[in-house]
Amino acid sequence: MRGVLDADKAKDYPWLTEAATRIWVADITSTGDKWLEARKAQFVGGRISPMAYNYGAVAWPEAGAVDFEEMRQHVLAKGK
């Protein structure tokens, strides 16, 4: 998830921060065929992920899950 709405990308792509922009993530509880709107999903840490931020998206809150904004802040902090 490197660069999820980070400041550098927002300068080049102002539409990234607009609420109308849709961001989709795969639901880790499915077989890869279920997609969730990222801003409405919950994110569970401690998962192995392709971009090494170790979050997986789920449709419903689970113990320890965080919302999009909190996950985004963790990703941006780790990327610096």
Image: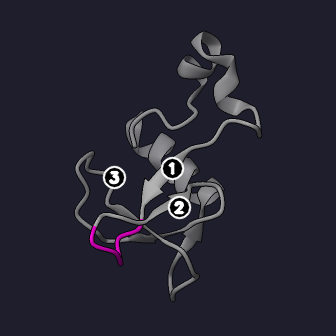
Q: Residue at x 57, y 55 (%)?
A: 38
Corner quadrant of residue 68: bottom right
- For mark 3, what is the residue? 53
Amino acid beneath label 2? Leu
- Identify the residue at image location x=31%, y=60%: 54
Q: Residue 69: image x %, image y %?
A: 64, 54
Residue at the spot x=75%, y=32% of the render? 18
Which callout, 2 or 1, points at the residue further toward the start of the chain?
Answer: 1
- Quarter holding the N terminus is top left
Q: What whole-number distance in Å separates the C-alpha atoms at marks 2 and 3? A: 18 Å
Label at residue 24: 1
Please, which colouring scheme is shown?
Answer: one colour
Q: Say whether disc 2 or disc 3 marks the residue closer to the N-terminus.
A: 2
The secondary structure that most of the magenta stretch takes on is loop
Q: Which residues are magenta?
A: 27-31
Q: Amino acid at mark 1?
A: Trp
Q: CA distance from mark 2 to mark 1?
A: 5 Å
According to the picture, the residue beneath numbered tag 2 turns out to be: 36
Residue type at the position of mark 3: Tyr
Q: Secondary structure at mark 2?
A: strand
Query: What secondary structure is found at the residue carrying circle 1?
Result: strand
Find residue 46 and report its image quarter.
bottom left
